[in-house]
Amino acid sequence: MTSSPPPVLPDERLAAGGARLAVRYRGRFSAETVQRLVADSYAQLAEHAHVRTHLVVLAERFAAERLDALAHVEGAPGVGLPRVLFVCSHNAGRSQLGAALLAHRAQGRVVVSSAGTHPAAAVEPVVAQAITEAGAHIANTFPKPLTDEVVRAADIVITMGCGDACPVVPGRRYLDWPVADPEGAPIGVVRIIRDEIDAHITELLDYLPGR
């Protein structure tokens, strides 16, 4: 790490969130490292946000996910629960469907995350509806940019239409699920896409350890 001072956070609430994360990761990461990552998470989300009402809360959640991934990478990758990352272009449709359905069906046996190479401002409303209809949770999901530590922490990276923009990290297992993009589609079509993704997840669950 360099000796440069950590960035000044743009909001007192964000600074409070950074302080909470610093306590959570005390002994693993310095407060300065946490603050830098919180500031970077906020900046990356703000770049794509249309409405910033909840941006501070989302930035803290995004930073926590990145810190968890970084702790895994710097600790003992390949042990503990399998980690699966879903990637699509906007992280507003297919990757959100995949992540929500896998988390719902795995019931805590898998660490699931999702990201986009060019994240949208929000999850597609019909995608959120299709997820909710399947009994999965959508409340805490939001489009996130793809970051290095999240990719390196994943055991399996599932790409869904991001093409050459999806990164390749040696030693990771890559799966490409060529499902249709639900953007702009009616709910009936999105349900078909959801069920196709769910069929892929059935196969994935059979493959994952502990089954």
Image (cartoon, helix red, strand yellow):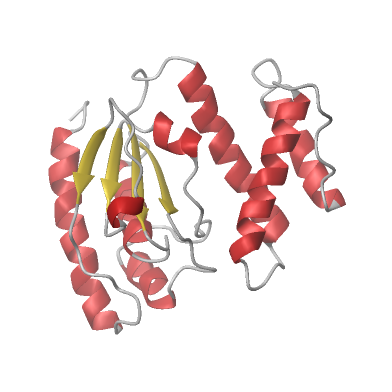
Q: Is residue 6 above or below residue 101?
A: above
Q: Is residue 31 above or below residue 12?
A: above
Quadrant hosting residue 161 = bottom left
State the residue at coordinates (36%, 42%): 167
From the top left corner, tell me how far across and down residue 208 is, in percent: 20, 32
The residue sitting at the bottom extreme is 186
State the residue at coordinates (72%, 36%): 36
Using residue 181 as the reference point, say whether residue 139 is left or right of it: right
Q: Is residue 126 above or below residue 75?
A: below
Q: Quadrant of the C terminus?
A: top left
From the top left corner, tell me how far across and down residue 148 is, in percent: 48, 37
Q: Is residue 129 above or below residue 157?
A: below
Q: Is residue 23 visible?
A: yes
Of residues 99 and 35, which is closer to you in this image? 35
Q: Is residue 21 visible?
A: no
Q: Quadrant of the N terminus?
A: top right
From the top left corner, tell me how far across and down residue 191 is, in percent: 24, 73
Total numbered labels placed on residues in the image: 0
State the residue at coordinates (54%, 23%): 71
From the top left corner, tell me how far across and down residue 70 is, in percent: 53, 28
Using residue 72 as the reference point, say whether residue 186 is left or right of it: left
Of residues 88 and 112, which is closer to you in this image? 88
Using residue 147 as the reference point, say whether residue 60 is left or right of it: right
Quadrant hosting residue 106 = top left
